[in-house]
Every structure is written in structure tokens, then in C-alpha cells.
Amino acid sequence: MDHAPSNQEHIANAALDQGAGYGIVLGLGGFFAFGMILVTFILKRYNRELQTSEHFNTAGRTVKSGLVASAVVSSWTWAATLLQSTGVCYRYGISGPFWYASGATVQILLFATLAIELKRRAPNAHTYLEIIKARYGTLAHIVFLVFGLATNILVSLMLIVGGSATINALTGMHTIAAIYLLPVGVVAYTMVGGLKATILTDWAHTFLLLLIIIVFALTTYASHDVLGSPSAVYDLLVKAAARHPVDGNKDGSYLTMQSREGAIFFVINIVGNFGTVFLDNGYYNKAIAASPVHALPGYILGGLSWFAIPWLTATTMGLAALAMEDTPWFPTYPERMADADVSAGLVLPYAAVAILGKGGAVCTLLIVFMAVTSSTSSQLIAVSTICTYDLYRTYINPTASGRRLMWTSHAFVVGYGVFIATFSVGLFYAGISMGYLYLMMGVVISAAVLPATLTLVWAGQNKWAAALSPILGLACALTAWLVTAQRECGELSVACTGSNYPMLAGNVAALLSPIVLVAIFTLIFGMDKYDWKSMLEIRKGDDHDVADAAGLDVEETSGAHTGTQSQAQFEEEQTKLLRAAKISKTTTVVMTLALLILWPMPLYGSGYIFSKPFFTGWISVGIIWIFCSFIGVGMYPIFESRQTLSRTFKSIYLDITGKSHPKTIHARMVEEEKTPGDVTPLEKSGVKDTAGSV
């Protein structure tokens, strides 16, 4: 991709004009910002959701499984999910989308176990770094603070760099303008609504995203003039393989799972994504926000629903690009796409323009915008929570009031938005693409995955193993990465260090070296005998000053209760979580084996080249799966929250018509529902959820 600041030919040939780019980035961004600010006002007025520091950073810990699932899907649907997965399909054929989807789904499924352990071990935590501090002390806390922030920064950079490149390619909008304007609306609604606004926006974005993916799939495989059926696409892929066979694929075919380079990407993808899930505080935020009984189903539903997004999107748009690039409708015709454009994530927008014209360009802009902004809001909250609780409250002002914590959270949201945009500009001028960042992130962060995981699941890990293994693992990873690059190419250029074999070496060394390092430090310093008690002592923020200023009783505000549980309630909650932990371990292991071994490996090992009927069945399963995903994370959250929605709309009607004042409604709600917002709903006992649970 040309990184020149001004490319008039590119702008002149863009599918849409610059006005469309500015309109979507500013107009749609402003619309979502206004909508979420309005929703925050409604929840405060009618559901007593006072925006305290606890509520801002944890959403009251009452979110149900449907919204947890949609939030997980939205947070994991980066620009890279859509753009990078389509690129690997263009490069490696039918195997690419599956390797991407399966290699990034298992982390969400496995994280469900950590989510349950987090709710069980540290029910009052705001970040996973607080857990590190409570167990190991300051040294390990600072080490993981660096790795955690590095994870969030890398993910944020991928989002902004990939999104701005796509907007520039489709509209000619200046890349620097896109970089700085994309976060504006996100910062606005995140600062006002906190984690709850982020989760609600995640649902809206996921709903629209799935609809557009369904449109792409049905157009490509059912109604397009040139494509229009799996059979037609199959025939065009056979011709494409004859024109330019894929090196390393069985017989050079695009229709086989046996792909050497695809398998290398698969390993890199698995390793890198462990770091971006297990070290991204955004996923712990979702677990913390979930009601205890909804964390497990939320993550499993979210993981399975997410699988269809990269799989079907890439199988549709990547294969459409291969099938259409030899036709005049493809933007680069008669040439193939340049490798730099593929790495920049431009396969999806080019394919969309080829099959739907300007409508495809608009749809692509919308899904990329939604993927970038929803994931960015998650990153803003993740970094804000870390900086507020793990930096400010831990090391600067341990007795900070709720008002001070709120102000600090707001400041970090704005500051991080400016920082990440400025950093992205530097990468743009340095020629670092989204694809490079995606492959490199595992090298940088994955050495901390195993020590972080063992913190919640193994009492024997000592503080030296936790603190030193990530540092030494990173050193091993960087050494393996750069030495392999030097041996492969004889130089350390961006192109060489970004190639598959150096990235493979670095990623594998990062993830696996801590296995040896933790064992060594355990032998040297002995096994710890941790009793898990210090994690239970993590305290919530004191928001009485915020509630007093608003003229409310903090004990009665929805989702912001500070009241303590009785011993019987605590024990019942722990029993439920322990049962959920056992279920999650079995379920996630079985699903992981299915997605990584039982499904793909027979196809890979046999070298089977898809027949036309098999290819048709493959596509049909993908389309059915995306509709199931739409039901699971698009429609189910509405059904699950129907009582809260009904009560809220009824309250708005009564207020507008003057038949009842919000204070009267609140009094009735408090009288009817006494269960604290951070206590497990006792459905079997006949106790209702809190008014603020959604």
C-alpha cells in the first residue's frame, strides 16, 4: 500500500468520495455517542443506575449471559478479524478462514474457565492485575502491568491502523484524519457511560455486523450475477488455481485444507491470540461485569457465536476476491492484488466493491467502523481500569474517594485515546501494517500467558516464577524471532521479520518457554502454598460521596450496591461457581479438541481437495452457523432482558404522561426487589434479579 500522505490517483479511483468517509466516521460515531449518552441518562433516571466508580468500571457486576456473549463477540471482532482473515483466505484458500477462526475461538472457550475462577477467587476485583498484586506483591504486579498495557496498546494499534487503511482505500479520506477521528465518538460515550455503555454498544454493533455479513454471504452464494451459487464460485476457484497455483497447497488448489503456509499461520494465530485474550484486561472486564451465574454461558455462547464471523466472512469475501479478480469489476483488474495491499487488509473492501459496487463499499465501511469502534471502547475501559486501580489507587492515592476515581477514569479514557491515535500515525509513516502487528503481538506478550493463568488455577506457583518467567520468556522470543529472520533473509527488515518462519519461531518460543522457566523457578525457590485468602480481600471503591452528591443512597442504587453478602449467600454463590468451574473445564476441553483436531486434521492429513458437493455443504454449514450466531448474540439478549426493557419503557411512558414520577417508580422497585446487585440471582429460590440487571 502506498503510504504517501497525498495520493491523488488513489483518491480519484476510490469507490466512494471523501464525504462518505467523514460522514460515517463523524456522523455514525456521533450518533452512537449521543445514543449511549441518552441510554445512560435513561438508566440513571428510571433504573437508579448511578454512575459511580464501581458502576463505571464493572457495570454493577450484574450483566446477563446474552449481553456478555455479545460483548465478547464484539470485543473479539477487531478490524483484523474481518480484514486479516479475508487476507489469509486470499493467500491460502479455503483453509485460511478455518485456521483463523478455530485458532482464535479456542482462547475464548478456554478463558471461560478463567472467568469462573476469577469470580470465585476474587469477587471484588476490577482487573486481573489486582489479583497479581494480592498474591505476589509489587514486583510481579509491575511486570504484569507492563505486559498488560503492552497487550492493550498492540490491540488498539491494530484496530486504528487497520480501520484507517480501509477507510482510506474506500473513500480516499486522509489516513491521518481517519486515525484521529475514529476514536472521537468512542471516547465520548465511553467516558460518559463506562463499561455498561460499552457493553450495550457492543450489542448494537454486533447486531448490525451480523446482518451485513449475512448480506455478503447470501449475495455471493445465492444472488450475484457472476457468482450466485457455491457451484459457480467453485468453478471459478478451480480456474484461479490453474492461473496462479498456491505454493505449499495440495496440487496448488484453493480448495484444500492441506496448506503448508496456512498451517504455519495457524500456529502463529493460536499462540498470538492466547496473549491477546488471557492478558487483555478487557476480557476480564467482561467476566467481572457478568453476574456470577452468567459468566460461563456468556463466554461459551460468545465463543461459539464468534467462530462463524471470521470463518464465513473470509470464506465469502476471500473466495469472492479470488473468483472475481480476473473480471473487470475487481478494483485491481487486470493485475492481482499487491502483497502490501493484502497485508494492509484490503481484500475485503476490494471484494465488496466487486460484488456490490458502492453498496459493498458502504457495507464494508460500516462493518469496519463498528469493529474498530466497539473493540476500541473495550480497550479504553480496559486501560482506564488498569491505570485507575493498578496505578493510581495502588501507588499514588490508596484512599481515593469514589469521585476521585471517577475523575481519574475519565482522564485516562481521554488520554489513552489521544496517545493511541498519535502512536498509530507513527506506525503509518513507518510502513507498519495491521498484518505485521497481528503476527508480532504473540512474540511480545505471550510469555506472560502461562504465569498469568497459573495465578488463578495453581496454588503452587511462587512469586519469582510469576515475576521472572515473562521477562526471560520475552528475551527468548525476541532472540528466536530475530535470529531466525537474520538466518532466513540475511537482514532485519520489516518484510523479513514479518515473514512466516521468523514469526513462527518467536511466537512459539514466547508461549512455550515459560513452561520450562516456571518449572526451573519452582525447583529453585520451592512450591508456594497459597491459600487464596488475599484475593478475597480486594476491596471495592467507596462511592458514598458520589451517591451523596446525587442525593441518593448508594445502597439502593441499581447495580452499585456495597452491602455485604450473608455467609449463606456467599456459600451458595461459591457452590454454584464451583459447579460451573467443573462444567467449564470439561466443556472447553472437548470443544477445543473438536475445533483444533477432530474437525480440521483429518482433512489436512488426507490432503483432500473439496469436491463441489462437499464445498456446497461447507458453505451451507457456515451460513447456518451465522444465523445461529445472530440468534444467540443478536436476538437472545433482547429476550433475556425483556422484563427490564418492558419496565423501563413503561416507566418512560408513565413519566412522560405525568401518571407517575420516577421517585415513585424507584420506591416500588426497591420495595419489590431487595437482592443486592452483586449477589448471585437466586432463581431457584424464587428471588428476582435486580432492576438494573440487563
Image (cartoon, grey):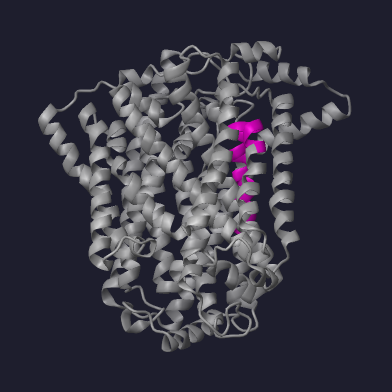
Identify the residue at image location x=34%, y=55%.
270
Q: Which residues are magenta?
A: 188-210
Total count of labels: 0
Query: Which quadrant, please, contains the C terminus?
Result: top right
Q: Quadrant of residue 60?
A: top right
Vertical order, 344 against 654 (above or below): below
Q: Quadrant of residue 380?
A: top right
Vertical order, 269 against 554 (above or below): below
Instruction: Please tell me whether residue 608 belongs to the stretch shown in magenta.
Output: no
Position in image of residue 642 (x %, y %): 66, 39
Question: Magenta: predominant secondary structure element?
Answer: helix
Identify the residue at image location x=47%, y=47%.
155
Front residue of 280/420: it is: 420
Position in image of residue 12 (x %, y %): 70, 71
Does any portion of residue 358 appear in the rendered image? yes
Vertical order, 688 against 546 (above or below): below
Position in image of residue 104 (x %, y %): 40, 54
Position in image of residue 352 (x %, y %): 61, 70
Instruction: Please tell me whether residue 191 belongs to the stretch shown in magenta.
Output: yes
Looking at this view, name the residue that lies furthest to the right: 657
Front residue of 681/212: it is: 212
Residue 84 placement, left or right of 59: left
Does any portion of residue 689 appear in the rendered image? no
Residue 436 placement, left or right of 608: right
Looking at this view, name the residue that lies furthest to the left: 523
Front residue of 587/351: it is: 351
Vertical order, 567 against 558 (above or below): above
Front residue of 574/113: it is: 113
